[in-house]
Image (cartoon, rainbow, N blue to C red):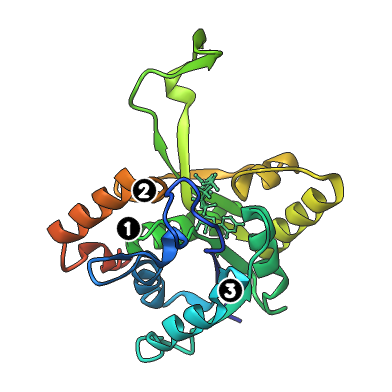
Amino acid sequence: MMSKTCAIIPAAGRGLRMGRNKPKQFLEVSGKSLLSHTLDIFSKASFLSEIFLVVPQDFISEARELIQGFSDSIRDGSRFSVVVGGAERQDSVYNGLCRLPSDCDWVMVHDGVRPFASLKLLEKTWKAAQISGAAVAALSATDTVKRVLDAVVRETLPREEIWLVQTPQVFRKEILLRAYEEARKYGWVGTDDASFVERLQIPVSVVHGERSNIKVTTPEDLDWAAWYLGRNPERENLQSAGGEA
Ligand SMILES: Nc1ccn([C@@H]2O[C@H](COP(=O)(O)OP(=O)(O)OP(=O)(O)O)[C@@H](O)[C@H]2O)c(=O)n1
Ligand SMILES: C[C@](O)(CO)[C@H](O)COP(=O)(O)O
C-alpha cells in the first residue's frame, strides 16, 4: 500500500518583529498574501495527501476563504484543512499533529512565512526523510561564526559544523508525534521540530536548503520578498524536480 504524507503549515504567529497591524502571513506581496504564495507551492506537491493550515483563532474565516481559492488546483484528492493555532509555534504544530488522520505515515512541517521554498526542495527533503526517518533543509554557514555574550566575542566556532536550519522538515509521523508528546510532558522548548526529535537521540538528516527560502520576519525581509517576486513573476520554483533525490 502507498504510504501517505500530510503537511502542517504553522501560520498562527503574530508577527511582532514585523511590527504591522496584521500578522505578516496575511500581508500582501505582489497581489496576494505571503501565505497564499506558500500555499501555491503546496497545492502543487502531488505527494501530499492532506495539508493542515494552522492559523490564529481570529483568522479562521480568512484562512477558509484562502483555501477555497485552491480547490481547483488540488490534485489526486489532496485537500486543505484549517486548524486553530496555539501560543507558540510548537503549540501550533502540535495542534496540527493532533488533526492528522491515523493513516498518515509521514509529516512535512513548513513555516507559512517561507513562501519561496521550491517544489524541488519539498520533494528532496521528503525523499531524504524516507531513507532516514527524519530530514531538514539547511544552509551551511558562509560567514565566520562566533559565540557572543554581552556584546563580547567568547569563541569562534568551527564553521564547517554550523548549518542554518530552514523548513521543510519531514519526519515519520510516529517519530514526530512521540517527540512532541515528550516535549509537552517534560516542558521542552524548541524553535523547530527537529530539536525535539534530536532529544530522542534520533538522527536527523540534512539536505541543502535554498538561499531564497527565507523566513519573512522583518520589514527588510518583506521588501526583499517584493523584489524577489518582481524579479521572478513566473515563480520558477513551482517546477517539480522530477526524479531528483
Ligand atoms: N504561535 C505561533 C507562532 C508562530 N507560528 C508560525 O511559525 C512560523 C515561524 O514563526 P515566526 O517567524 O517567529 O513568526 P511569528 O511568531 O509570527 O513572528 P514574531 O516572533 O516576530 O512574532 C510562522 O509561519 C508563524 O506564523 C505559529 O504557527 N504559531
Ligand atoms: C522553524 C524555523 O523556521 C527553522 O529555522 C525557525 O526556528 C522558526 O523560528 P521562529 O523564532 O519561530 O521564527
Name the amino acid type tagged 2: Ile
* For marks 2 and 3 on the same chain, the one whose residue lies earlier in the sequence: 3
Nearest to the observer: residue 232 or residue 129: 232
Nearest-to-viewer mark from 2 and 3:
3
- Cα separation, mark 1 vs mark 2, equals 7 Å
Q: Which mark is residue 116?
A: 1
Residue count near mark 3 (Cα–Cα under 10 Å), binned few <14, some 14–19, many ≥20: few
Name the amino acid type tagged 3: Asp
Q: Position of residue 178 (x, y in %)?
A: 77, 57
Q: Position of residue 93 (x, y in %)?
A: 64, 61
In the rendered structure, the answer to whether residue 23 lies left or right of residue 55 reads left
Q: Which mark is residue 175?
A: none
* For marks 1 and 3 on the same chain, the one whose residue lies earlier in the sequence: 3
Please name the residue that numbered disc 2 is placed on: 214
Nearest to the observer: residue 39 or residue 173: 39
Question: Is disc 3 placed on a helix, strand or loop?
Answer: helix
- Please give the name of the residue rendered at 62% of the width and 75% of the height, measured from the top-left corner: 83
- Cα separation, mark 1 vs mark 3, equals 26 Å
- Please give the name of the residue rendered at 37% of the width and 86% of the height, measured from the top-left corner: 69
Please name the residue that numbered disc 3 is placed on: 58
Disc 1 and disc 2 in contact, CB within 8 angstroms: yes
Q: Is residue 244 visible?
A: no
In the rendered structure, the answer to whether residue 143 lies left or right of residue 204 reads left
Split into quadrants, the picture shows ligand 1 in the one at bottom right
Cβ of disc 2 within 8 Å of ligand 2? no
Nearest to the observer: residue 180 or residue 198: 180
